[in-house]
Amino acid sequence: MTAGQISDGAQELDAPVPQPLHPVTEARLGLLMRRGFDEGAAIDLAHRLAARDGDLDDRRLCVECSRLQRDGVCFAARMQWMPGVSQFLTPLPTTFQRCSFFDSALKA
Ligand code: SF4
């Protein structure tokens, strides 16, 4: 707006209105941030998870799993539930994979 123009408030109406997050996305963001991701990284990862779901891809991230411990070690491995796997396994937390020991950290 230049000097002398009168605002009719239309600019304010054109401003984007924040949309409420889907409950699953909101829960994921909370989980990811509790697990140490900053907000931007958590949002990026939540988008990747939503895209995965949209593709009906059944792979998971260890960071979604209740068995991933704070020190990065997998609890299932530590308990030696995984034959042939070191009990000090530190899986890649943000790599999509299939794991028969996956247990969602987000309970319904
Ligand atoms: S149980 Fe599987 S999915 Fe869960 S943290 Fe361990 S390796 Fe990752």
Image (cartoon, rainbow, N blue to C red):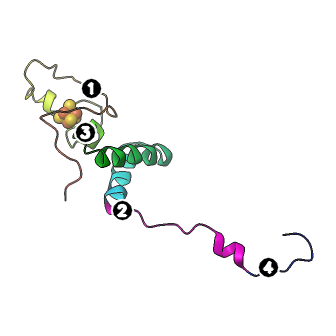
Observer-nearest of 94 and 7: 7
Relative to 63, 98 lies left or right: left
Instruction: Kindly report which numbered mark, 4 or 3, lies closer to the viewer in this rendering.
Output: 4
Does 31 sit above or below residue 26?
above
> Are dots 4 and 3 in contact, CB under 8 Å?
no
> Are dots 4 and 2 in contact, CB under 8 Å?
no
Q: Which residue is mark 4?
A: 7
Relative to 1, 100 lies left or right: left
Q: Which mark is residue 18?
A: none
Looking at the rendered structure, the secondary structure element under dot 1 is loop
Observer-nearest of 15 and 39: 15
Looking at the rendered structure, the secondary structure element under dot 2 is loop
Residue 35: x percent and y percent?
A: 35, 43
Q: What kind of secondary structure does the magenta stretch mostly adopt?
A: loop
Residue for point 84% across, 80% down:
6
Residue 94: x percent and y percent?
A: 34, 34
Instruction: Kindly report which numbered mark, 2 or 1, lies closer to the viewer in this rendering.
Output: 2
Q: Which residue is mark 3?
A: 60
Residue for point 32% across, 31% down:
95
Q: Which residue is mark 2?
A: 22
